[in-house]
Image (tube, rainbow, N blue to C red):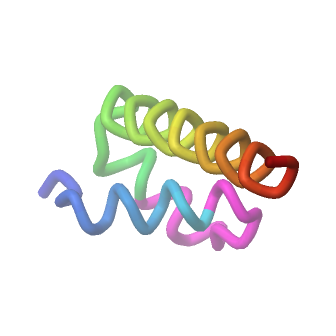
Amino acid sequence: MPPNLKRILQSTLAAAFGVQSQKNRIQDFEEGHAGWFILAGIIFLVIFIATVITTVNLVLA
């Protein structure tokens, strides 16, 4: 069964913060499609960078 949106988001956030367990990582690779995790990672990265830029601009303004 492929992972649902909640599972993809949970795995992406856990991996981004470095707390992804070995068991979950293996399960993601066996059950999931890499494209969904890559897309979620790119979206997370864009949101993270936009948040950092916005925060810095608000502090410096």
In the rendered image of this protein, does residue 7 appear above or below residue 60? below
Looking at the image, which residue is at 34% across and 26% down? Answer: 35
* Magenta highlight: main SS: helix
| Place of residue 18 in the rendered image (x, y in percent of width and height, measured from the top left) | 76, 63
Number of numbered discs visible in the structure rendering: 0
Side (left or right) of 57 relative to 31? right
Side (left or right) of 59 relative to 6? right
| Place of residue 55 in the rendered image (x, y in percent of width and height, measured from the top left) | 72, 54
Is residue 17 magenta-colored? Answer: yes
Q: Nearer the viewer, residue 42 or 59?
A: 59
Q: Kindly give the residue lying farthest to the left in the view shown.
A: 1
Which range is magenta? 15-27
Looking at the image, which residue is at 55% across and 62% down? Answer: 13
Image quarter hosting the N terminus? bottom left
| Place of residue 14 in the rendered image (x, y in percent of width and height, measured from the top left) | 60, 67
Is residue 50 magenta-colored? Answer: no
Q: Nearer the viewer, residue 40 or 37?
A: 40
Residue 43, picture quadrant: top left
Looking at the image, which residue is at 62% across and 49% down? Answer: 51
Residue 19, picture quadrant: bottom right
Q: Nearer the viewer, residue 22 or 5?
A: 5
Side (left or right) of 31 relative to 2? right
Side (left or right) of 10 relative to 7? right
| Place of residue 7 in the rendered image (x, y in percent of width and height, measured from the top left) | 31, 66
Residue 40, picture quadrant: top left
Q: Nearer the viewer, residue 3 or 52?
A: 52
Q: Kindly give the residue lying farthest to the right in the view shown.
A: 60
In the rendered image of this protein, does residue 51 appear above or below residue 18? above
